[in-house]
Image (cartoon, rainbow, N blue to C red):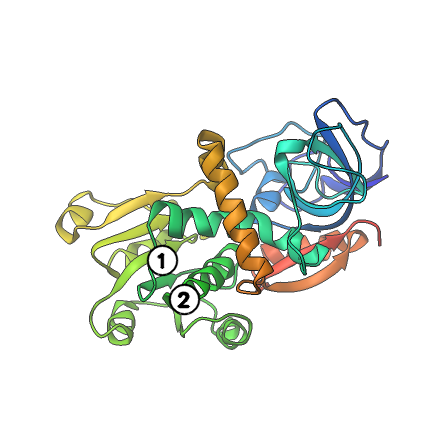
């Protein structure tokens, strides 16, 4: 089968190649899947550099999440040949076939394409875990989402709107502002250049935000601490700016807000029943047409470099989805 293999860790993707390797052999407890779509996530890029917290030893197959059809599974596993499934693993998604534990898969909601399913899993589970599970999002609340062109941020915008929140999307790219307005349901789109607290205050009538969802870190995190209302929550999702922010503890003390660390996958591993419930809630919203992932482009796996470089160069507004069989 064809698979995207990371042979060595480099900054320029020179250690990555599309290779022909043997098909995976299904082990007991696993489900063998033919992959129709797999989405690119920022950790996929970081893992090619050895810059993510999970550091697999090369060679390994890249790709966190995928969607496809079941080929073979154990009786009683909950899956049968022909079932449409979504899910993944820390590696292995950018290939024509994968064999993963049954607990790592779920059925694709009715009406959702393979590309949508591949783009939905990690992004929406992250958004739901942070906004709803950890911060108790309620209808009518104000939510500020930074890094608004990324797949996780767009999922947070989409989910927050579906649940009745009022959303401010923030981006550091003037070029992307119009694209975010067109591809998301945000009520307002603002720039994160400079001091944007005053803009947030004006939009919210001085109330500021109940929740700030921040995957950017760095200077954006610093300014976002000024955008949280008393009693609100600032969710730390990641550090795409490249700088891990620091904060003096007197700031959340005086302003009375909480800083919430978000690792959705780890949360689901610690609380598996809640993880299943979150996935079920997301599936219900998807089947009802309340949420739909933003996809920037769909590419054959042979054009993997285009997708990775577009992510590295911050060109995307939405997810890249690869089709391994094309």
Q: Secondary structure at mark 1?
A: helix
- SS for callout 2: strand
Q: Is residue 217 above or below residue 58?
A: below
Q: Residue at image x 56%, y 60%?
A: 314
Earlier residue among tags 1 and 2: 2
**Which residue in the protein does label 1 denote?**
220
Residue 54, quarter of picture: top right
Percent x, y of residue 6 = 71, 37
Is 199 on the left or on the right of 299, as rendered?
A: left
Q: Quadrant of the C terminus?
A: bottom right
Label 1 – label 2 distance at C-alpha: 10 Å
Q: Nearer the viewer, mark 1 or mark 2?
A: 2
Is label 1 in contact with label 2 (beta carbons under 8 Å)?
yes
Residue at 61 percent of width and 46 percent of height: 45
How many residues crowd around disc 2 within 10 Å: few (fewer than 14), some, or many (20 or more)? many
Q: Which residue is mark 2?
A: 170
Confirm whether residue 90 shows in the render. no
Name, please, the residue furthest toward the front: 76
**Total numbered labels:** 2
> Is residue 251 depicted above or below 23 in this figure?
below
With 21 as the anchor, is 54 left or right in this view?
left
Up/down of 319 relative to 34, above or below: below
What residue is at 26 percent from the left and 72 percent from the top? Answer: 204
Give residue 212's position: percent from left, percent from top: 34, 57
- Image location of residue 59, percent across then percent down: 72, 30
Question: What percent of the width, then of the height, locates residue 108?
Answer: 66, 50
């Amino acid at each position: 089968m064809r698979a995207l293999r990371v042979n060595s860790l480099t900054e320029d993707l020179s250690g990555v190649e599309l290779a022909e390797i043997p098909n995976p052999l299904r082990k007991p407890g696993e489900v063998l899947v033919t992959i129709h779509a797999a989405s690119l996530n920022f950790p996929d890029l970081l893992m090619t550099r050895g810059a993510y917290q999970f550091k697999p030893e090369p060679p390994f197959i890249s790709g966190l999440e995928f969607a496809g059809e079941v080929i073979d599974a154990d009786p009683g596993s909950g899956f049968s040949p022909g079932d449409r499934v979504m899910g993944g693993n820390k590696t292995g998604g950018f290939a024509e076939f994968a064999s993963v534990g049954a607990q790592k898969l779920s059925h694709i909601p009715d009406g959702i394409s393979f590309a949508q399913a591949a783009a939905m899993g990690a992004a929406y589970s992250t958004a739901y875990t942070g906004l709803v599970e950890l911060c108790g999002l309620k209808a009518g609340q104000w939510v500020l989402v930074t890094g608004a062109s990324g797949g996780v941020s767009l999922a947070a915008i989409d989910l927050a709107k579906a649940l009745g929140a009022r959303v401010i999307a923030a981006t550091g790219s003037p070029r992307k502002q119009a694209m975010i307005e067109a591809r998301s349901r945000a009520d307002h789109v603002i720039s994160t250049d400079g001091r944007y607290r005053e803009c947030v205050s004006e939009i919210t009538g001085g109330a500021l935000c109940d929740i700030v969802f921040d995957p950017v870190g760095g200077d954006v995190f610093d300014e976002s601490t000024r955008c949280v209302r008393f009693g609100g929550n600032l969710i730390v999702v990641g550090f795409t700016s490249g700088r891990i922010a620091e904060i003096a503890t007197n700031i959340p003390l005086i302003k009375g807000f909480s800083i919430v660390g978000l690792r959705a996958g780890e949360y689901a591993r610690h609380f598996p029943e809640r993880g299943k419930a979150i996935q079920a809630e997301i599936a219900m919203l998807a089947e009802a047409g309340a949420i739909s992932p933003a996809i920037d482009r769909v590419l054959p796996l042979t054009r993997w470099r285009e997708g990775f470089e577009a992510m590295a160069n911050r060109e995307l507004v939405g997810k890249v989805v690869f089709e391994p069989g094309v």
